[in-house]
Image (cartoon, coloured by chain):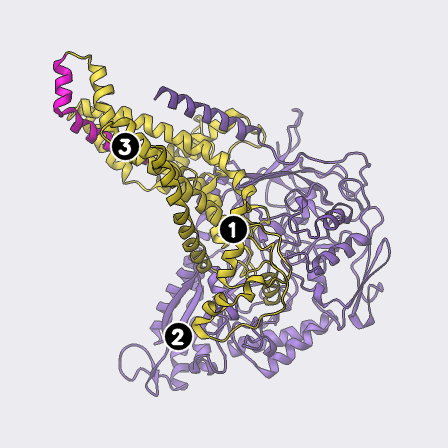
Amino acid sequence: MRRLNIIFSFLIVASVIISACATATPTTVVTEAPAVPVTEAPVVVPTEVPPVVEPTSVPAAKKVARFIWTQEFDTLSPIYTNMWFVSVVYPAYLCMPWMFDDQNAAFPYLVTEIPTADNGGLTNEGRTITLKLRDDIVWSDGEPITSADFKFTYDMLMSDKNAVNTRSPYDQIESFETPDAQTVVITFPDPYAPWLALLFSGSTSGTPIIPQHILQPVFDAEGTLDTAAWNKAPTVGCGPFVFDEWQSGSFARFVANDNYWLGRPKLDELFFQFVPDSASQIAALVAGDGDIGTFFDYPDLPTLEKAGVKVVNSFSGYNEGIYINMHPERGNPALKDVRVRQAIAYAFNREKLVKDLLLGLTGVAATDWDKSPWVDPTITPYPYDPDKAKALLTEAGWTDTNGDGTVDKDGVELVLTYGTTSRQVRQDTQAVAQQDLAAVGIGTELQSYDADTFFLGYQDDGPAATFKIDLVEYSDSPDFPDPNTAIWLCSDIPTDANPAGTSPTGLCDEKLDGLFQKQASQVDYAARQATFHEITRYIFDQAFWIGIWLDPDLFGFSNRMLNVKMSGATPFFNLAEWDVSQ
Amino acid sequence: MTRYIFRRLLQAIPLLLIISIVLFVMMQAMGDPLATMGGRKVTKPEDRIRLARQLGLDKPVCVQYIYWLIGNDWTRPVGEIPKPNAGIFTPIVQCLDPRNYIDADNPGTRKGVLRGDWGISLVNRQPVTKVIGARLPNTLLLMVTAEVIIIGAALLIGIYSALNQYTAFDNFVTATTFVLYSMPVFFFALLAMYIFSVNFRKWGLPYLPTVGMFEPNVGQTPAQVLWHMVLPVATLSFGFVAGYSRYIRSAMLETLGQDYVRTAKAKGLPRPEVIYIHALKNAALPIVTLVALDLPFLLGGAIVTERIFGWPGMGRLFLDHVERSDTAVVMGIMMMIAFAVIIFQIIADITYAWLDPRIRYK
């Protein structure tokens, strides 16, 4: 027994020492090159979120912003991840031609100006986009950032040796040229409207560039970047911070990049503590063990605000809603009648749901593009009006002839399958909707799936992709801040011949299809906006999509944080200006 | 005994093989790892098809298992194989088609588990051994500490209660253990966190940290790690101490009533010798079984506790990678635990023989 105790004691001591001494890659911040004064960085105005604190005469301690992050990074390489929890951090250690500000407007970052037709950046009827790079931009090791880095990133995305997360929209590029070190010329076969949101952009849908001088030798030696050490330890970057350390499951740390071409950031360190449990995240923020958190459940917001945590809504294009299954063969015949679809919208008391379930902290969504300039401004959500819903059902021939509480027609009861993911707020929403719809005689069968099952593709017999569900609830924001989406195109309906289709509705509407094809090639903003006003009005009137709630990203900041501004497209766009009160 | 151990190890080989097949097949029902890839956006279908091909996920499950087991560095391209149209029997038809085993778009480099290659994680493209190796020390630190405290505290409480049956202390311990034993781990953990971290800080008292292994401003020192272990270890220990102490109390009460104990007392042996040498040794047999069953699962970590306290251990690793349907990592963890269960069972058998000379293995 004594020997056993000795062994256990030894194990504990050894483990403590190993854990304490375990360090990942050491920092490789280079401090040789002089910092360049700020030239075109966004104008930073102290946010109204936290109070400004006067500096004191006490020697300054290290300024650390502590993030409580509920999902650990999978990789830090932008070409290998699909995680939102990684892409929002890109502005810390990577760089892009442009980012989006708190109005979701693009501003130049690596380029001298945003390409437009007026400045010659957008030519060939919108097919060719020319990026003019600044001449003072450098990687954190002092190497200049050139057009070769853009070409290398493009080549790596398109190489079949790399299992990258997405090739969109790079797989549509016709030619990619770099006539000189500061010029990148990209040509699409057709005018490509969403380029600003997707092409190397700073939005969470975009892909920042990767360093050729670091990764080309790795690719040459290993034949792939899939297992490159840089993916987990990008010790050379180009943002205001540079990667320092990442301990699996525990934390990741980025330190100030002294070589940042816009000047050293105000913070010394960004510390990401990985805490997967949302209740623990709240406790850590309330206790003051963290400064920044995100992805809160609405019921937790009062607790946070009571503890002095400022919650900021950041609209990033996500609006929760119900896609109606309109598939010609597999869709429920009752839903082919617009009056039945509208009856669902009138019967579902979404105002009450938002007030009770989401504490009135967001609003009811009318269209999938709400809170963007692409929505017809005259659209307002369908009001809660059960009498109108009943009248519409009666007008459509649906009445309760057998007195069982559910309307029927030609001997068929109106019972719809209603499916979504297992996210708690969605399941709660289903329960509320079921009660509301039952009150007007519409029956529902509720289904909930794990997200990896719910979003299975057509070839894998996914429930939504194969149109087994009548009412499909989720939110997506594929190209935000661009409004483009392929899901309403006839050509995107999944079939045996086209298993890659993405349409969740199975709808092939000639008018809608024409409008979506038209907008995809409209590079003129005003013309495209007019097309989208027509699209949003048509989808709303036809009730092809029924909005439930506006689903902004929720971020919480402790009252230590200063100068924070948020953008839906590039949430941490002004990270270099963030500061903490000591 | 040596022959017995050797035979048990040999028996373990087919057992592990069967376990691996069952687990591998079950993993295929965990969803599509490419559906969202941990993101908020649905993976574009053309990317999903390409990634399935590049990562070998478009192969029939039996082919994927064979590649996992023996690698695919022996394969060579044979061109596209049309998918048979055999309804629900399609997977079986594919498994029986030898072309599926030698076909590879890119002849592979995997060596397979039997040659020590546990594969690459789908989540972070890191070798499985590296992914698990980064977490194992943290889990062992937490779990071994908790197990030592559990066994030590349970022995003390159990023996004391047995020796002082129906006293105020025994009644108090009995009531407390029932309360603790019936309390869910997540509830105890969050309660402890809110009391000792959040509210103690609010009340101006010395407080414990909420999450993590150290304060970023202080650094990862042994003192910081120990300080951050207090709440997770307490959470892991409370229920087990309650349960184990009841087992020990019962076993000791039964043993203390045996004739040989009475004889030992009658012979005038010192009380500590009667209790700790004669009684406890026999009473320990059921405890050995319990501990031997628990020890292998120490490697698996504690999913709830690690999740709540943000402790970077195996439990969280397992959960994170199950959620992403990462077959390689999940198989690595499960096979490691399966192997440990077999080894600890053999150790338990050996310990039985040491504790009870009547037991002999052939």
Of discs 2 and 1, which sits in the foreground? 1
Of discs 2 and 3, which sits in the foreground? 3
Three-letter amino acid code of the residue under disc 1 = Ala
Tell me the CA gap for discs 2 and 3.
55 Å
Task: State which region is magenta.
Answer: B239-267
Work out whether mark 3 precedes mark 1 in sequence or the reverse, and give the earlier one: 3
Asked if the stretch drawn in magenta spans residue B353, the answer is: no
Q: Residues within 10 Å of mark 3 (few under 14, many from 20)?
A: some
Res A416 label: 2
- Residue A277: tell me if it is visible: no
Q: Quadrant of the C terminus of chain B?
A: top left
What is the secondary structure assignment of the residue under circle 1? helix
Res A502 label: none
| Chain A pictured colour | purple
Q: Is residue B275 above or below residue A402?
A: above
Q: Is residue A222 above or below residue B90?
A: above
Three-letter amino acid code of the residue under disc 2 = Leu
User: Residue B294: x and y, percent?
Assistant: 35, 37
Q: Residues within 10 Å of mark 1 (few under 14, many from 20)?
A: many
Tell me the CA gap for discs 3 and 1.
35 Å
Q: Residues within 10 Å of mark 2 (few under 14, many from 20)?
A: some
Instruction: List the residue tagged with mark 1.
Output: B328
The chain letter corresponding to yellow is B
Tell me whether marks 2 and 3 sit on the same chain.
no
Tell me the CA gap for discs 2 and 1.
39 Å
Res B287 label: 3
Q: Residue at x 82, y 36 (%)?
A: A34
- Residue B98: tell me if it is visible: yes
